[in-house]
Image: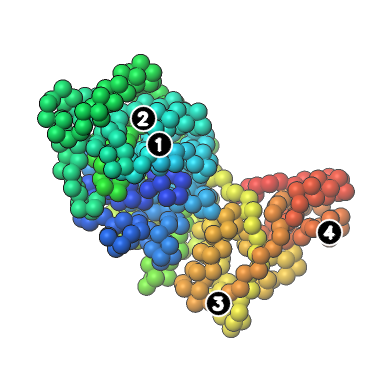
Amino acid sequence: MTDYSKEINKRRTFAIISHPDAGKTTLTEKFLLYGGAINLAGSVKGKATARHAVSDWMEIEKQRGISVTSSVLQFNYGGCCINLLDTPGHQDFSEDTYRTLMAADTAVMVIDGGKGVEPQTRKLFKVCAMRGIPIFTFINKMDRDARDTFDLIDEIEKELGIPCCPINWPIGSGHSFRGVYDRETQKVLTFHNTMKGTKEGVEEEIPLDDPHLLDEITEDQKETLEGELELLDGAAEDYDQEKVNSGKLSPVFFGSALTNFGVETFLDHFLKMTVPPLARKSDQGMIEPTADYFSAFVFKIQANMNKNHRDRLAFMRICSGKFNAEDEVYHVQGDRKMRLLQPQQMMADERHVVSEAYAGDIIGVFDPGVFSIGDTVCTPGHKFRFEGIPTFAPEHFARVTLIDSMKRKQFVKGIEQIAQEGAIQIFREMKGGMEEIIVGVVGVLQFDVLKYRIENEYNCEIRLDMLPYEHIRWISNYHDVDLNNIIGTSDMKKVVDMKGRPLLLFVNSWSVGMVLDRNEGLVLEEFSRN
């Protein structure tokens, strides 16, 4: 074992996922509050605490109160160094979330106690299940009227197909919410004033048989709790660490992130139940985190996090060994040695330069335009690649027109940079240059973000005209096909992507089959191979 395995074993890297508005960003803030990373947490929306969430750094996120990009935050708590990835819950930004999940070892799924499992929760859950990573469930908003607790657990088990093991159990909900009962310690945790959730609250632990408990909860609530616990002991799954590690059992916690109920106990249990960084799959077998060489992969590229410096950052998840800022690394896809410039760790948009980091950590490095999502970097002398990150086929298309043609240069630069971040895909007419650009996105809201960013970060005014296309196919054998003689349908358009690969856009899905029938030997693919 190398001498830094001790540091690596302290690391915990997890992503928070949820449907929009389940309270994910608020929960993130509270983790940081307990980790001492921020002193006062800001509610995402709301007048009483008129601050923006720490993890929402883009101007548009602060205005709308939603997370648009994933942000990376690091803090220390309970002797562990925690890397937390906050992801956008809104379905239009799910691609960013998928990529972020590739960098996490564990996922925390936040569910709104009043709404239960929602569409986006299902979608994101599938990705976690595909990767087989441990999933913890935090049922939030218990300070508002919530659904029956057994119904919620039942819904998670049925809808998502994962057995649940409640670690604590709520007492009441809404105005009558009094706290949670910890099944392990057999004590009730009650919570008091937390200044609307902006400071750590005072909590009290009271054993179930202590008469003082009735000062905090009513006789009825105690009776209900005892009945529910009896039912739970008979019906609920038993806790099994191995099943949790392989994503086959989800420990469930209850609380209210907004008022700090149950957040700290969740963190304490979470650190006990999660594992240090895991081995990663590469084309040369599994790469162990404690290996004596450095390796990492790029899971996200972000331009202009700092408006004063026109910069571009590549976010990397370190998979093995120790990173030293002084050392040269080998960029596998670019086949060259380089030094990673300005390595830094984040607190959303506040950064500090780091000279070293370990497996499990996330670092951002200056990207001079050489990295792509999914690239591997490692100690020179090694030449393996980590598993690729999937690209999604866009479902919405628009034509982008620049209003002031004098600003052509910064417009092209801006749109190309945003495309390299992976938020949009850009195409152009087969014979045309960059005069007419077609943008494809997975979710419509990304058009708003594109327009906003081009206008604010690159100072160009643009017009977006929606196009009717919904289906996209790459021509995989384009070297063997005469592109000019493809017999198409009336709703088909030929375009090329940024790498010059030809593809076809269709309005109707049945047109895809017709084009294949009319052109013998043509091979079409739904995904591009990076």
Q: Position of residue 400 (x, y in %)?
A: 63, 70
Label of residue 147 in the image: 1
Occupied quadrant, residue 166? top left
* Image coords of residue 81 (percent x, y): 27, 43
Question: Is residue 341 depicted above or below 293 in this figure?
Answer: below
Mark 1 or mark 2: whose residue is earlier in sequence: 1
Q: Which mark is residue 490?
A: 4
Q: Going from the N terminus, do you reach mark 4 or mark 1 first? A: 1
Q: Which residue is the site of mark 2?
A: 251
Quick check: marks 4 and 3 in contact, CB under 8 Å?
A: no
The mark found on residue 461 in the picture is 3
| Real-space Cα separation, disc 4 to disc 3, in angstroms | 32 Å
Give the residue furthest to the bottom.
406
Where, by quadrant of the figure, is residue 264 drawn? top left
Under mark 3, the amino acid is Glu
Q: Amino acid at mark 2?
A: Pro
Structural crowding at the residue carrying mark 2, measured as other residues with C-alpha within 10 Å and reported as few (<14), some (14–19) or many (≥20) = many
